Amino acid sequence: MRTTFTYDHYADYAELTERLLYFKEQYPKYMHLKSLGQTPEGRELWAVEVTDLGTGNFDEKPAQHIDGNTHAGEVTGSMAALHQLDVLLTTHDDPQIARLLQTYTFTFIPRISPDGAEVYLKTPAALRSVNRPSGKAPEEVVRQDLDGDGVIRWMRIADEDGAWAADEEEPRLLRRRRPDEIEGVFYTVMPEGMLQGKTDSALKAAPTLWGLDFNRNYPCWWKPEQPGAGNYPLDNPETRAVADFLIAHPNVGVMITHHTSGGMILNPPGPFSEAQQEPLDRKIVHAIGALAKEEMGYPLLNLYDGFHCTEEDYAAGAGDDWAYLNRGIFAVTAELWDCQSRAGISVEEQLDPDLGEAERLRQQKLTLKWIDAHCPQAWKPWTAWDHPQFGQVEIGGLDYKFTIQNCPPAYLKQECEKATRFALRQVRLLPRLAIRRFQAQPLGHDFVKLSAEIVNHGYLPTYISSQRRQMKLAEPIRVELSGAEIIQGQAQSEIEALEGYALDQTELSFSSVYGQTAAMRKQLEWIIRAPVPTTVELQVMCAQAGQIRAVCTIE
């Protein structure tokens, strides 16, 4: 895929902004850049709209929404969003891309948490969404880069009562001490860091001070007791800005929110099993998942079912759930990058709820073998270090941030390209209104019969989803005829929604064809008085399906 910029490193806020401003300057006929507001640290929360303005404004076409970096450390997501934007603009003259831009609008919020991402990219720290305290200052062992290598790794302390021992086959890894294991070298294991506060007995890793989770802060089955949920839904300016943006764009019908990692596509609903989802919507979601599987190799998982959730234990307040359950948008979460899959470990194996110690260690060995072959610099051998509190310790292990949570930079381009290929197929599911036929039949004495056929060429219906209908957010199709005196019919009217071919229920076998087709078209007629020559205009408008126009000249 041809791009203007390279995708071999992770852009900080300054570089991200520089790229967006460059695109704004170079492509004024395609792109609009605006700030949704400033973060508490004064960074702009950038939003982008892209379409071919020569064929209609941003709000006159059905739209896809792409965002990334809901979580501060998931910076692959923001790069994937930038990559798709880059491809659309850089190759706008490619026939296939040009057609997409003529037909659809694309909206982007590349980095939902610019403050958090900046901390993640420029310090050794890892954090959930943003560097704002979510509780009291932590005690116990607080993560810190002690040896100054820029990475927070593992720390092991020789301890005759320790619960861990070096694995015999792969001594760089630690296994659990066996129940009857009395002799040997054992370790207590902690994250690299310093002890804060008092401890009388057990050591444990301190919870993060920065525990706010934007993906638990949306007003959809929100649970105040869930870690990171915030004080109330949308109390973070970043999540409120995202919600306001989507509400202001009713033409958004499909959406991908880019996260990491795991190599899977997660689909709402998250608070309950997809078996309870309306069948049509479930069918469409699985069609989207099939596209992702073809382009990315990643399986589709319903969050509730795939992660073995219960009615008491499920992810509440998620952005994709809000987009689908509250707004009727077909939103999916793309969990980009999966080091373990590259190492030969399937997603099903990784998510096994009964994963035992032996299997955990087997998976770690396979992962480390892949790392040795492809990014050996990510692993640091166990190295002695004089700890001011614990005495002699060893520090070692993996650069988790850029091997597991995000791809090593050498793999960033191919991960972005996979995400873009999927996105450019997903957008094609949107409804596409067309005026297939608009013609006049003279009746004599300046009377003319006008007829038109309005059709939806898209896979999705003009109301997008059953969920949007249920939420009473699906706007009707409005029809306006102008330019002549109307004798019969209406100048302004509304017509019923047009189905997409997803609704086709025909079945085909060698012996027969049965079932029914979808109601994808509507015939309209008027009688007008129109002395020759007269030009009449027909406009068809639908908030979620776009606007189209046609003219008929009576001669």
Image: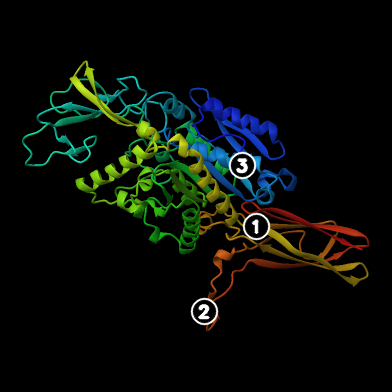
Q: Which residue is mark 1?
A: 432
In this view of the protein, which residue sits in the foreground, 288 or 161?
161
Q: Position of residue 351 (x, y in %)?
A: 31, 50
Question: Of the residues shown, which amino acid type is indicated by label 1?
Answer: Arg
Looking at the image, residue 552 sits to the left or right of residue 394; the answer is: right
Say what secondary structure mark 1 lies in: loop
Mark whose residue sits in front, 1 or 3 = 3
Q: Which residue is mark 2?
A: 509
Say what secondary structure mark 3 lies in: loop
Q: CA distance from mark 2 to mark 1?
A: 29 Å
Q: Earlier in the sequence, mark 3 or mark 2?
A: 3
In this view of the protein, which residue sits in the foreground, 397 or 482?
397
Q: CA distance from mark 3 to mark 2?
A: 43 Å
Residue 311 seen in this snapshot: no
Give the position of the N terminus as an image quadrant: top right
Say what secondary structure mark 2 lies in: loop
Q: Position of residue 23 (x, y in %)?
A: 65, 34
In this view of the protein, which residue sits in the foreground, 324 or 85?
85
Question: Of the residues shown, which amino acid type is indicated by label 2?
Answer: Ser
Question: Of the residues shown, which amino acid type is indicated by label 3?
Answer: Arg
Q: Earlier in the sequence, mark 1 or mark 3?
A: 3
Q: Position of residue 451 (x, y in %)?
A: 78, 67
Q: Which residue is mark 3?
A: 2
The residue at the point 66 percent across, 67 percent down is: 521
The residue at the point 22 percent across, 18 percent down is: 387
User: In which quarter of the view is residue 159 placed?
Assistant: top left
Above or below residue 323? Residue 482 is below
The residue at the point 30 percent across, 52 percent down is: 349
Looking at the image, residue 496 sits to the left or right of residue 68; the answer is: right
